[in-house]
Image (spheres, grey):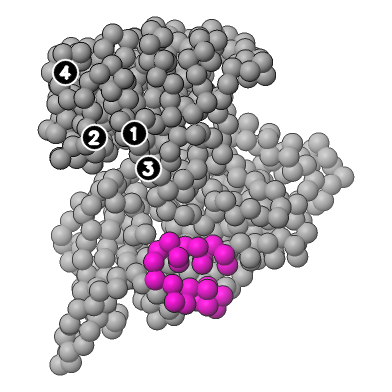
Amino acid sequence: MLQTFKKAMADALAEIREEKKIRSTTELFLLFSMGSQFDHLIKQKLDALGVFCLVADPASVTADDVLMIKPTGIILSGGPASAYENPPFDGKIFDLGVPLLGICLGYQMWAHHIGVPVTSSDKREFGTHTFTITKPSALLKNLPKKSKVLESHGDKIYVDDKLNIFGTTDNAPAAAGNHKHLWGVQFHPEVTETEYGEKIYENFCFGICGAKDKFPASKVADKKIKDLRLKIKDKKVLLALSGGTDSSIVAYLLKRSLEDSHQEFPHGNLQGNQILGVYIKGIDRPDDESNVIKYFGDESWIKVKIVDATDKFLTALAGKISMKDKRLAMRGVYKEILESEAKTFGADFIAQGTLYTDVSETGGGYDSGSKKAQIKIHHNVGLKFSLPEIQPLIDCVKDTGRNIGRSIGVPDELLIRHPFPGPGLVVRIEGEVNKEKLIIARKIDGIYIKELKKWGFYQTVWQAGAVVTSSTTTCTKGDDASDGHVIALWAVWSVNGFTARAAELPYDFLKHVSQRMTNEIREVGAVVYRISDKPPVTIEWG
């Protein structure tokens, strides 16, 4: 869990005073994390604006606590609960007179508090919709009359005399409104699909709340390197090295911290003996192993070990049908191998490229008593290793991690690689995973990614994948009739993985890929393309 503000105790107040002193400011914003999958993105937006923001636990922070720290403004995130279910929050905070911005659930909560009806809607809104400004407001200053916004809600705020409504969408007549010092929107300004989201937060912080101080963002990479140096010193680290972007960035952060550490601790271990990168093969992409060898195999500062766990994975996955059961089985093998290799290496730490996205979707995130939905179980979260963990990117999403990587010299080819799930091809195979399906999954991935690069689409989409579904279809190849697997292709546009939009790949391209797969792979009977956005679907198949 990540640190949150829970009570206005002496130590917490002292830390707040110290941070204000560093920033030369008297201003502070409170963000109540109500359990949204996007809550971290709100803080990221506020950090980008340069304001001092504390994440607060709605289950423990009271109106008295708020009065003691005197925030400049308050934000309530969205969440999976309903306002009429009384999610944990001290309603007296709404009555303090402090400017407050409610996002989705947060908006519904204060509307419910002042007596505006909020109920489940027959026409729920998920995905991108057109937002229309109906009258001028301080929150929407300098926004166009119409823009795209990302909505993800099943409840509806009714039109009411208590509300000053200044924006609507098709199924949300009160999509933006206020009541005195309380402001709210039924969409998510923090995600990239909302076109002018950052401007909305800027209007709230500097317009409505009257904030004036901007603290320049510190060099995040330098701080992470310093923290790693102080933690590792001359000790040994095992890194789960997948060949993807995140673990590669962690490898370079470790390299930089190791270089700094050896200047401070010159009598420690030699560089090449301090970091062991373990690559686990068996459910990986066709080119992951070669990628690891290419970029890390000959480096003096890291040793690389390839562990072939194909048989262990297949044994653990035998009989497992649901994606959840397969994820659990896969992560059991993953943990066992890392623990074993760490013991052999004599490691003091186990490092992973875990992102905040992984933590959030697994049901974690900011330490909060608020309800948090578990979207899927990630392989690298909550494993409880016998050794201390190092996860330098745990407070980052994909785009911020990539920015850190660029600033410390990670090769661009590693940074632009599409994200790939930790459970690998396990989640790109429906039903039970066996050796035959693994072979098919590798072949279709190889064709799809190669063609995306050849046609110039690889860098224009954020991620793409091919799934061996459990459906079969009758097909004819030559003079023979047989059954073949239905392959589902997908590709998305995104920035951070919290939200995504189905990429509109040209029909000619999809037709070409389909022909290659059905012609070259005997077991493939048909190819389809998924056009759903996130939400409501997740990016990976399961």
Residue at coordinates 23% horizontally, 41% vertically from top-left? 126
Distance of mark 3 from mark 4, alpha carbons? 33 Å
Do tag 1 and tag 2 residues touch (Cβ < 8 Å)? no
294 sits to left or right of 212: right
Magenta part of the protein: which range? Answer: 311-333
Do tag 2 and tag 3 residues touch (Cβ < 8 Å)? no
Task: Give the image quarter of residue 137.
Answer: top left
Sort mark 4 into few (<14), some (14-19) or many (20+) by Cα contacts within 10 Å: few
Label 1 sits on a secondary structure element that is helix
Q: Is residue 189 magenta?
A: no
In front: mark 1 or mark 2?
1
Residue at coordinates 22% horizontally, 36% vertically from top-left? 120
Q: Which residue is under mark 2? A: 155
Q: Which residue is under mark 3? A: 498
Which kind of residue does numbered mark 4 sit on? Asp
x and y percent of residue 245 in the render? 49, 50
